Amino acid sequence: TIMWSVVGCTVPESVTIELSTDNAAHWTTVSTSTNTGSYGWLVPDVPTTQALIRVSGSALVDSSASVFTIQPVSAPTHLTAVAGNGNVSLNWTTPPAEGITGYDIYRGTTSGSLSLLTSVASTATWYTDTTAINCTVYHYAIRTRVGSLSSAPSSEAQASPQITPTITVLSPNDNAIWHGGQTQMITWTSTGCTFSANVTRHYSLTNGADWN
């Protein structure tokens, strides 16, 4: 909030508020406001260490006693992505910024080429992506939103949701009777994101006590 005071017999009804980002070399108008002594200001995302505010009205004018700093909107930090079966869980640390209105979550299959996935509330510190496809490598980043302003993207985190690896024998099964000297097909299925090129087949004549 920009605040000022006016003393004198004639008090202006309105004031002009201006911003300089280069220590008074140049000025831009922030607002022409009713002279209430304060103005709620959405600070622009123009990083500088040489900012000044000037308030003027009816030939009266005053500016900040010294320069102040405008910092850019900060991105979330410590973003992590943990893969599950058909989902990826994201967690992050909120940035030290005031007036956060939400976070935009970005996703892509190529680092540096991400698109908006969803937006979440300003109180959120986690999100579960349930649209992730198993066996796909995803990259994630998050931007902080403050009103109409957005931060730069956070550092990326990546994860690849996985199917739990399994191998299932289909035949022989269910008390099948196979006769010696006959050729029978041993069949199986396997699931997972990676598959071995070769498998080893064993047989037991002792209900699993020993294997050959």
Image (tube, grey):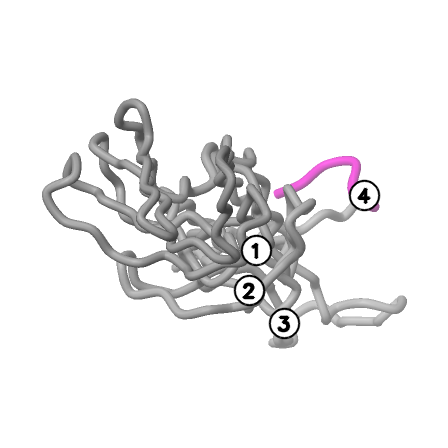
Residue range of the region highlighted in magenta in the rendering:
207-212
Which label number is shown at residue 162?
1
Q: Secondary structure at mark 2?
A: loop
User: In the figure, 183 relative to 5: above or below?
Assistant: below
Write down the quadrant of residue 85 in the picture: bottom right
- Marks 3 and 1, how far apart at CA: 24 Å
Which mark's residue is nearer the viewer, 3 or 4? 3
Residue type at numbered disc 3: Thr
- Marks 4 and 2, how far apart at CA: 39 Å
Which mark's residue is nearer the viewer, 1 or 4? 1
User: In the figure, 40 relative to 14: above or below?
Assistant: above
Q: Is residue 137 visible?
A: no
State which tag comes first along the sequence, 1 or 2.
2
- Marks 1 and 4, how far apart at CA: 35 Å
Report x, y in % for residue 34. Answer: 54, 57
Q: Residues within 10 Å of mark 3 (few under 14, many from 20)?
A: few
Left or right position of 42 against 153: right
Which mark's residue is nearer the viewer, 2 or 3? 2
- The residue where tag 4 is placed is 206
- The residue where tag 3 is placed is 187
